[in-house]
Image (tube, rainbow, N blue to C red):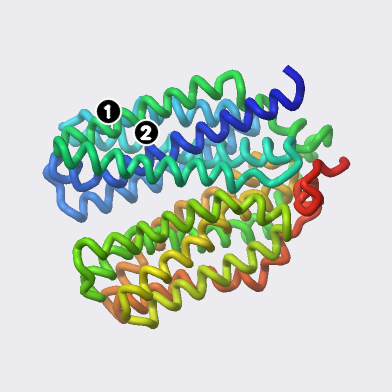
Amino acid sequence: MGTRELTGAARVAVAAAYAAQGFGYATVVTALPAVKERQGIDDTAVSLVVLLVCLTAAAGSVVAERVAVRRGSRVALLGGLAAQAVALPVAALSTPLVPFVAGLALYGLGLGLVDAAGGIQGVLVQRRVGRPVMSGFFACYTAAAVAGALVMSALVGGTGVPGAAGAMLLAAVLLAGALVIGRGRLVPVDVPLAGGGLAAAPPRVPLPARGIVVFGSVVLAAFVADSAVSTWSTVYLHDVLLASAGTAPLGYAAYQASVLVTRLVGDRAVRHVGRAPVAAATATAATLGLVLVALVPSAVAAVIGFAVVGVGVGALVPLAFSAAGELDPARVDEVVARVNLFTYAGAVLGAVAVGLLADGPGLALAFLLPAALVAPTVATARRFALPGAVAVGERTGRPAAR
């Protein structure tokens, strides 16, 4: 196969990994009510299970960095897919609490491996293509997550708890399928493709800590917003704004639809106007959407606000990973894995902190927390316009000369 065919095959494999990851995660989070019923646990125990998955996912991201440095992100990504494919049947079928918790811990580890290694592989493919493609990968994740939630809804609605187990088993099959697709197609070596022949960075040279913090903070803010909307939008609409049971889920639905559409058009927008303007515009949109939700006590305004937040979150996450991948092309594996750690901090902060604030100033004003975290991205958006192959190719649509 020529370079173009190899790049196309790698792109398909990375997209398959993102899609399998999204489908699997959606089935896990939407299975929680059925899992709670089957295991006979309360809300506190469910919260601890979610925290366990986040912590083991963070550990998986660290492991991905170590594996990628020594053997390449391809190995880390395949290992993460395998871990999830094994873990989900264990969690889906285990009634005893110990194997159930062990299965979810293994799932979290695999989740972190795929999150980090998939981000590295996406950056490498993007560099070889020479134009933005990261939003497309995240669109695969989002579309598959929506499909996973719909499958769970259909199966649980028909058979109850066994349906939830069936959906998780289907997710395991898809993860195994992504593993098979990726074995011969993922980018096998990181540094040569990342640097286009650049020598590896000298040992003991510090990583670009400031850039990691800048783009990691963007990822953290985006995931605080994502977790806040995902966890609390339906509760806010139903309990605070007194929306009907049929109307309350529309906030989350509008949010996810907006995330998906943004990711489908995101790469094209970057090619036309550049990464920094897109980052500034979408961060502004997310901030205004959250402020609208917090300050206008109307169900219609809330649904519109959540949709606008989706524009920001849908764009900022792939933009941040793309920009982070250019901080040190010869050490993209380490940089992306460390930026990925901010994902889990944001997810926990968005779910927990917003909930705690709801008991104080109220759930409406609690949405100002993610707004305050996203807003600074508008001022730092110029950092997204980094030199490098994709930055030059953003406006031309052609691979940049190296």
Local secondary structure at mark 2? helix
Where is mark 1, residue-wise? 90
Seen from the viewer's position, the closer of residues 1 and 356 is 1
Please provide percent x and percent y for residue 112.
47, 40
Q: On the rendered structure, is 107 left or right of 41? A: right
Mark drawn on residue 106: 2
Seen from the viewer's position, the closer of residues 352 and 291 is 291
Nearer to us: label 2 or label 1: 1
Q: Is residue 366 above or below residue 163?
A: below
Q: On the rendered structure, is 11 left or right of 307? A: right
When asked about the image quadrant of residue 22, the answer is: top left
Marks 1 and 2: in contact by CB < 8 Å? yes
Q: Which residue is located at x 46 percent, y 69 percent?
A: 370
Q: Is residue 169 above or below residue 226?
A: above
Mark 1 or mark 2, which is nearer the start of the sequence? 1
- Decide: few, some or many residues near mark 2? Use Cα within 10 Å; few <14, some 14-19, many ≥20: many
Q: On the rendered structure, is 214 left or right of 226? A: right
Pick the quarter of the image with the N terminus: top right
- Please name the amino acid that badge 1 sits on: Val
Please provide percent x and percent y for residue 372.
50, 74
* Residue 99 in sight: no
Q: Which residue is located at x 39 percent, y 48 percent?
A: 54
Please provide percent x and percent y for residue 259.
48, 55
Local secondary structure at mark 1? helix
Tally the numbered discs.
2
- Please name the amino acid that badge 2 sits on: Leu
When asked about the image quadrant of residue 399, the answer is: top right
Please provide percent x and percent y for residue 167.
28, 34
